[in-house]
Image (tube, grey):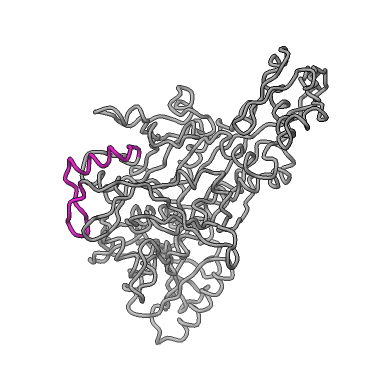
């Protein structure tokens, strides 16, 4: 399906549309309409069910604004950049790497140095998309993507809108570990907005300045904690390893999670586990698995802290788009916050049996260090303690050299008070490692819409419908009175709709236009089942009945009103419509599908 058709359907039927249209619009911001907001909420609920509830994890909700030191520690202030090139003629700014990818065979220009991107722009005579002026000779610069703000009035604290939800989890680790009683492994999830000041937003929901993430941070002891890989070992996956991407004739590898972990294609068993979980989840919510793959990051695009990283990618309009990332982040995040913050980002790992060990210690004579080093005396004492832990043999000489603020100080060994003592330890403090599955909710929504878009012919008319999985469809069912001139039909239809809503179903009520047009409207927004109240259902000596129509096949059955809520609930829980046709009378329709 072409992007234009998706955007037109999304706008016309209330899935999503550009924000602030009354004021000319604002690039990179989209409003989810009634259908889109419901679809998005259902995707989030399905993700929460699988990655929070079924995994036994806990969910938090942290602020979207955080102070500057958080992002200094995380590295975002220095490294969270995209490549910007500005047109010298019209002044428009563009993602330089995207321009190169659109004009050349280079697939991952983001991983290239800026100088090489400048060369590609010159050699391929790439012009400004806005005005057509040549961009050769223009500098490619790093542009930090974070939105800055001030916390408090006047010269208040500098802050930023979070560029990812993960930092809100990492910063709160010292308290979160208490809720887990210090026991590893444990996982924390969060679903919420993140903000990136994109240079050139594009592609509908694919590249926004405000978007929703669903992230899991799994904290583990790398020496002892293994994932329950047996749960997903037989899950079949289509992998695009880095080694295949660099070959002229590189191809996919069709395998299982267990085999890919065993032979090292997937470097981390934890990453392999979550690829398997994600594969089953994507199938559950309706992603077309023939248009889906896991692509391994090339060395140049992998974050410096990530030992292994894979993206879940879906095909939309002929392009592969990233919809989730799976990274083994090591101890980078917690170690950085431990160094910058005022709290402890480690956990105490208790030994099975106490251990007696030798430990090097120092007890500096401050009455000597004070006069000798003045204001640096305390820092010299700390440096001596650090040196004793790292290199005890350094104290074998008559003097010991330590460095404080770039200056070397020598201390007599006897003044340092060096000694080796036997101590009994019951455990040690370790910094957990982190495994992170991170999902883009908006990109998943756009993928589902693109993959669900279908056309066929029903009652000699062409129709467009969204074959959305019932779990994520905006509405569970729609209720129609066949005609509005018969008060008996409208009264029963009102009662049926109210009863279904009371049973927890999301129900639309539509009494406008012909029944065929009402079906088409519901098909186009992906409503899986339509309930019609007709005269045949009330002009009977037995129980009142209604017809239930299944969206994809347009097949219909007639069933008692008293059974309706229970049967729809079973259908929405995964029972096939064919099972319903086995139990009830079918209603013949003139259906032709392409």
Residue 389 at x, y = what percent? 71, 23
Magenta span includes 71 = no
Q: Nearer the viewer, residue 586 or 7?
A: 7
Say which of 572 and 389 sits in front. Answer: 389
Is 139 situated left or right of 55 in this image?
left
Image location of residue 475, percent across then percent down: 46, 65
Q: Residue at x 29, y 53 (%)?
A: 94
In x, y percent, where is residue 421?
Answer: 82, 18
In this rendered view, identify the residue nearer to me: 4 or 538.
4
Front position in the image: 450 or 435: 435
* Residue 470 picture location, percent across and down: 46, 57
Q: Is residue 577 visible?
A: no
Name the residue: 40% across, 87% down.
Answer: 485
Residue 134 within the segment the image draws in magenta: yes
Q: Residue at x 45, y 37 (%)?
A: 303
**Quarter-wise, where is residue 256 in the image?**
top left
Which range of residues does the magenta coloring cover?
Answer: 111-136
């Amino acid at each position: 399906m072409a992007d234009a058709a998706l955007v037109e359907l999304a706008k016309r039927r209330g899935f999503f549309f550009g924000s602030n249209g009354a004021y000319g619009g604002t690039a990179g911001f989209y409003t989810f309409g009634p259908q889109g907001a419901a679809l998005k909420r259902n995707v989030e609920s399905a993700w929460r069910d699988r990655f929070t509830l079924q995994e036994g994890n806990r969910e938090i909700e942290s602020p979207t604004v955080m102070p500057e030191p958080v992002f200094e520690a995380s590295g975002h202030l220095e490294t969270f950049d995209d490549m910007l090139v500005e047109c010298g003629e019209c002044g428009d700014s563009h993602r330089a790497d995207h321009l190169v990818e659109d004009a050349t065979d280079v697939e991952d220009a983001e991983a290239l140095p800026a100088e090489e991107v400048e060369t590609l722009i010159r050699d391929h005579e790439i012009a400004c998309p806005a005005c057509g002026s040549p961009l050769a000779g223009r500098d490619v610069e790093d542009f930090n993507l974070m939105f800055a703000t001030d916390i408090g009035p006047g010269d208040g604290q500098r802050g930023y809108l979070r560029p990812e939800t993960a930092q809100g989890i990492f910063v709160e680790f010292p308290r979160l570990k208490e809720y887990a009683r210090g026991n590893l492994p444990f996982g924390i999830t969060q679903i919420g907005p993140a903000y990136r000041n994109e240079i050139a937003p594009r592609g509908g929901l694919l590249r926004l300045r405000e978007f929703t993430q669903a992230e899991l941070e799994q904290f583990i002891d790398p020496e002892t904690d293994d994932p329950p890989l047996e749960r997903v070992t037989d899950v079949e996956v289509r992998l695009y390893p880095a080694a295949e991407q660099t070959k002229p004739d590189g191809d996919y590898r069709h395998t299982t999670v267990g085999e890919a972990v065993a032979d090292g294609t997937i470097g981390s068993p934890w990453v392999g586990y979550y690829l398997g979980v994600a594969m089953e989840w994507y199938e559950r919510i309706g992603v077309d698995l023939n248009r889906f793959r896991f692509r391994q990051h090339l060395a140049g695009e992998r974050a410096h802290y990530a030992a292994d990283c894979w993206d879940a990618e879906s095909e939309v309009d002929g392009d592969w788009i990233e919809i989730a990332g799976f990274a083994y982040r090591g101890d980078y995040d917690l170690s950085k916050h431990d160094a910058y913050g005022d709290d402890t980002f480690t956990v105490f790992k208790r030994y099975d049996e106490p251990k007696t060990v030798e430990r090097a210690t120092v007890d500096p004579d401050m009455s000597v260090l004070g006069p000798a080093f003045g204001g640096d005396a305390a820092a010299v004492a700390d440096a001596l303690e650090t040196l004793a832990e790292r290199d005890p043999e350094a104290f074998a000489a008559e003097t010991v050299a330590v460095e404080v603020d770039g200056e070397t100080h020598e201390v007599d060994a006897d003044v340092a008070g060096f000694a080796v003592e036997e101590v009994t330890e019951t455990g040690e403090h370790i910094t957990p490692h982190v495994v992170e599955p991170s999902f883009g909710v908006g990109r998943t929504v756009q993928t589902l819409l693109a993959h669900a878009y279908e056309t066929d012919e029903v009652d000699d008319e062409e129709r467009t419908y969204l074959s959305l999985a019932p779990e994520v469809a905006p509405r569970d069912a729609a209720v129609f009175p066949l005609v509005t001139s018969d008060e008996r039909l409208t009264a029963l239809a009102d009662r049926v709709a109210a009863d279904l809503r009371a049973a927890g179903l999301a129900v639309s009520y539509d009494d406008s236009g012909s029944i065929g047009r009402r079906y088409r409207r519901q098909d186009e927004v992906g409503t899986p089942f339509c309930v019609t109240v007709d005269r045949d259902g009330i002009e009977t000596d037995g129980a009142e009945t209604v017809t239930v129509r299944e969206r994809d096949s347009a097949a219909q059955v007639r069933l008692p009103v008293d059974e309706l809520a229970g049967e729809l609930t079973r259908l929405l829980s995964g029972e096939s419509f064919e099972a319903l046709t086995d139990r009830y009378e079918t209603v013949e329709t003139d259906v032709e599908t392409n």
